[in-house]
Image (cartoon, helix red, strand yellow):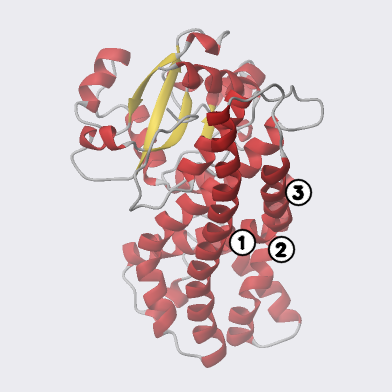
Amino acid sequence: MNDRTIRNLAHLRRSASTARVLNLLNVYNEHGHDPDWIARPLFRTPALNRALIIKHRLRRDELDLFRLRRQVATKVVLPIDASDLKAGGHFVFVGERDYERMMHEAFGIDREHPDIAALALLDRLPSLDPFLLREQLRRAGIELAPCYFSISERDMERMIRFVEDEIRPLVTLSVGYGLAAVGSTRRLAGKILSNDPRDRMEALRQTLILGEDEYEEGIFCWKGFLYYKWVLGSLAADIASVAQAISTVRPLGRADQAAQEYLDRGRTVLRARIQKTCQEVSLTLRVYDDAYASLTVVGEPTAFRDFLREAPRMFNRLGEQLGAIQHIVSFWRFRFSPGAANVSPEELIDIFMDFETGLAERAEDPGEVILAA
């Protein structure tokens, strides 16, 4: 690990998890003695349950670590000294070549171990957003202690209300207006947000003429689209505020000419990429909006059926994009919160490079990942 990596690991010690970083060390430090954490941990291997799980955009020299080409990998970072992250850490990518051998040598666990299965579930997600993380694990029958999820009850209630408003046209199409529709809307919202095998909305599956596995995967991604639509709306003001702050933030201390030139360029590039990424997210969400309107307004289910079939493919890219935006907002709130230490030119360059890499286009050179390295 290089000096920048070590500095940024140290920053993560006090920060909350983001859509790109699951800080299990922080969860352990705050809840390691809670009976609920002890009874329902994410991993059974103690070292893994104190790791940093990071969605990492691969650098060009890392692409050959995998048999199949991919742009983002799940990195497991194990601190050398949990009390001093400046000491750095060891890491492994989930699914890299010789992954199972490395896990066996490091932890004594084999491919059948539950921790291997849990890591595979995390690797399938495009981001580590707490709502999607919880839903993914619940699908596999894994119920974790609530301390793992940094989503508040207030946010969950807001999410439920958003889903109710979103699906009201579907309920109205089915049962009409009135008191019956009000109750049906709440029940259907509960079914959509539930992973109970009894809540499969069989009538909708039959209407859309989808197989059970195809339908289940499509509904999970539909949840993701609903959640991402809610997140984008909820973060709109914060995204604009952070983009403006990026333009005006100044480091403490004198920057040399090269550093100043990079920071000046970085401000312009980051603002443009944030705007472009938000536009692309909105366009992807519009695919869902159009398909849903075709079902609920026109009464034609074909477009929505096609959406559910295509949703898993779009879901990953959407998650990567919005996850990068969420990470920028969350990390900026942490690092530049009232009372936080001033940022040096070198650290501000690190932050800009990290954000820029997270927003990089697939066709671009992934460059050097800083925070996730």
From the viewer's side, name the closer residue of 320 and 241: 241
State the residue at coordinates (43%, 59%).
315
The quarter of the picture where the N terminus appears is top left
From the viewer's side, name the closer residue of 141 and 234: 234
* Residue kind at label 3, given as amino acid type: Arg
State the residue at coordinates (38%, 38%).
367
How far is mark 3 from mark 1, CA to CA? Answer: 16 Å
Q: Which numbered dot is residue 190?
A: 1
* Secondary structure of residue under mark 3: helix
Q: Which numbered dot is residue 161?
A: 2
Q: Position of residue 240 (x, y in %)?
A: 70, 54
Left or right of residue 120, residue 87 in this image:
right
Residue 152 visible in the picture: no
The quarter of the picture where the C terminus appears is top left
Q: Position of residue 356 (x, y in %)?
A: 50, 43
* Secondary structure of residue under mark 2: helix
Q: Is residue 260 above or below residue 31?
A: below
Q: Which numbered dot is residue 154?
A: 3
How far is mark 2 from mark 3, CA to CA? Answer: 11 Å
Q: Earlier in the sequence, mark 1 or mark 2?
A: 2
User: Which quadrant of the figure has residue 11?
Assistant: top right
